[in-house]
Image (spheres, helix red, strand yellow):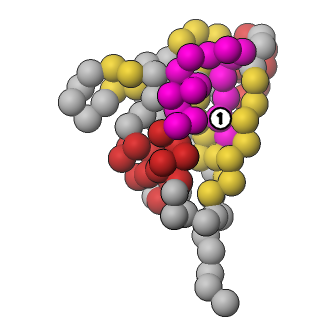
């Protein structure tokens, strides 16, 4: 029997977040071939929920409970979140490569 390393991923987003759709697509691609990735989605509707969940903008991805894309000093918020791409531009989701790295380095 092959050992499978499990990675628990929680995607936090406000209702109807357009960035969440981009993240969903990229996350599916990044997780392809990684049998231990378990994704849970959680809709955040209040500032209190954002604080409790550790959502520093929508969408936020927690890998084994850690926001691997958090920047120092970032605070929980019900705001849109942008991620720096490999070319330094900003987008509503990390790249597939960045996500794959986060999923395999946990």
Task: Let me know if residue 18 is in the magenta part.
Answer: yes
Nearer to the camera, 57 or 75: 57
Image coords of residue 8 (percent x, y): 67, 52
Vertical order, 63 against 106 (above or below): above
Q: Which residues are magenta?
A: 10-25
Nearer to the camera, 88 or 74: 88
Q: Which residue is mark 1?
A: 11
Residue in view at x 26 percent, y 35 percent: 86
Q: Is residue 106 something one can see in this rendering?
A: yes
Image coords of residue 70 (percent x, y): 48, 31
> Secondary structure under badge 1?
strand
On-image quarter of the N terminus: bottom right
Q: Is residue 5 left or right of residue 91?
A: right
Q: Is residue 26 left or right of residue 45?
A: left
Vertical order, 30 against 81 (above or below): below
Neighbor class of circle 1 (other Cα within 10 Å; few <14, some 14-19, many 20+) is many
């Amino acid at each position: 029997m092959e050992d499978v390393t499990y990675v628990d991923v929680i995607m936090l987003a406000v209702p109807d977040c357009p960035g969440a759709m981009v993240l969903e697509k990229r996350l599916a691609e990044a997780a392809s071939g990684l049998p231990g990735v378990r994704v849970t989605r959680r809709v955040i509707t209040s500032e209190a929920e954002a604080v409790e969940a550790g959502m520093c903008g929508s969408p936020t991805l927690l890998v084994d409970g850690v926001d691997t894309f958090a920047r120092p000093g970032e605070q929980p918020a019900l705001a849109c979140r942008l991620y720096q791409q490999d070319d330094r531009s900003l987008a509503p989701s990390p790249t597939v490569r960045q996500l794959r790295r986060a999923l395999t380095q946990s």
